[in-house]
Image: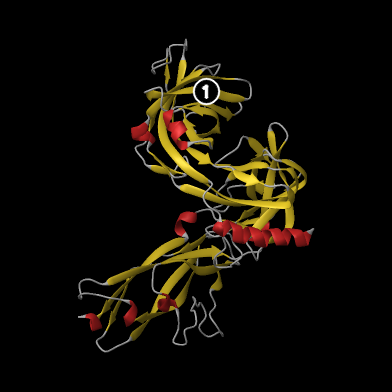
Amino acid sequence: MQKLHLQLLAAFTLIAALTPAYAVPVARMTWQAEATADANFCVSATYDNAPYDVFGTPVNFGTDVGGFTCTGSYNGSAFVANCTSAPDNSKFNFTLNVPAVLAPPAQNDAVPFVGNVTSSSGTVADAIGPVTYTFDGTQIWPGTTAPSATLPGCTGLSGLVYQFVGQGGFNAFQTQAVNTGTNVAVSSVATFTDPDTGTQRTANIGVRFADVASGGEVVVTATSSVAGSLNSNFSVNIGGLVPVYFDVSTTATITGPITVCQHYDDADNDGLVDGTGVVETDLRILHGEGSPYVFVDRTVLPVDTANNTVCAEVSNLSPFVMAANVTTTSTHDSVVLPVGPVKVTIGSGKTAMAKPLKVKVQNADLTETAGHEIKLAIIGNTCPTSLLRDSLNQPVDFDFDPKAFGAQNSIVVGGGKVKVATLPLNVVAADFTTPNMKSPSRCTLTLSASAVATDTVIEPNPTNNKITVEIDVVDKNDF
């Protein structure tokens, strides 16, 4: 069985790199809503003026549709809304189902408002064609009420109404064919728009069906949240981890176990998920089970750190999410101090110039007597490759201890203390072009400081463990 999983992981890694887009953003909008205490509600929304390419069909809901109005109610397990495009009710009409537990509104609390579009119609829907839509957004109650409804189309509401504001968007997902056979694998790069930031999130997903008796279609959807709970041993947003909930559904007739895998990034091979303090071996795939969903660990261990993939095995399909096992965690506050622009001038007749870059890291755990180990790394680079190569064309790294053999890119730093590392830069004249002394050629290095630990690290203030350093080069050979 383990060999079969490894074969799937290797195939998944290749397929994911070649998979066409099966998921794209469609539209973003802002809305106002009014609701009574028994959760009858209405919505008035305006689409952003933003063009998207939806599987080859160009759309701009801001100009093509305009907005929409909805009326709806709570059915005991979900908010169900019937929505009509406005001002022209022939453009894009839809029915929305948002699973949720009815609860009194909390003032200024951003609540996920995530669900599925169960039907759609209209000229814009027809132009896009058959796809699966999800709705991803957040809603806030700023504390305002009104003695009666004020929004257009809210005439059916009576009595006191709570007034909400929200933002979000539609994302579209295409189906893939599933053929009959054994160990049938499909892969999808599920991309969707984050409702809060408007940025795109991506989940590289691989699925293997042990036995497909009759073929059909499969669709992988992704959202920012799913109504449900998870055990306290796991967290979906610890240490900088960003949750992506994904769901797999199929019309094929399947039997036997289903293996579901998600890829994660560790480009610098430091054992941490890129951009987080999460140790890759702590990653787990949780599966939503029961009603309401309880997310249960179904991970196939060990995590494949060679292919940066974590898998789960299940017998049925419902939402999944990648989480971190937080049974053992530690909290460390590591800071990289600001660095001013690095200015380099290459004299006439010179082909290169060595420039040491000195960077300070600080342990901000002031009461930590023994200190903790801090690693300094380059996580972003717009500079020529030669800048980070020595005279023998070997890669260079930060060095906290020049007396020791090789580059020591980490060091134990006492609580409140500072240590300095040096990165030897090799500025090659041929890689920079400058028209005059006042117009340097510029590139940047993005650096991060992170605690080195055997468990998942919680970074209490991730805003100060990354900096971007500007490298300004003037080459006098050019003028």
* Whether residue 199 can be seen here: yes
Question: 411 or 393: nearer the eye?
Answer: 393
Q: Can residue 167 be seen in this view?
A: no
Q: Name the residue under label 1.
A: 81
Q: Can you say whether 429 is above or below 362 in the image?
A: below
Name the quarter where the N terminus is drawn: bottom right
- Residue 306 coordinates in the image, percent (x, y): 65, 66
Measuring 63% from the left and 42% from the top, which residue is drawn there? 218
Q: In this view, does 207 lie to the left or right of 411?
A: right
Q: Three-letter amino acid code at disc 1? A: Ala
Q: Position of residue 70 (x, y in %)?
A: 46, 22
- 9 or 244, which lies in front? 9
Q: Quadrant of residue 266?
A: bottom right
- Where is 47 relative to 431, above or below? above
The residue positioned farthest toward the bottom in the image shown:
349
> Residue 372, percent across and down?
59, 66
Q: How many labels were placed on the picture? A: 1
- Residue 276: which quarter of the image? bottom right
Q: Which residue is drawn at 31% across and 76% down?
A: 432
Describe the element under mark 1 as helix, strand or loop.
strand
Q: Bin the neighbour count of mark 1 within 10 Å (Cα to Cα): few under 14, some 14-19, many 20 and up.
A: many
| Quarter of the image with the C terminus in it | bottom left
Asked whether 85 or 30 is in front, the reply is 85
Q: In this view, does 247 lie above or below 14?
A: above
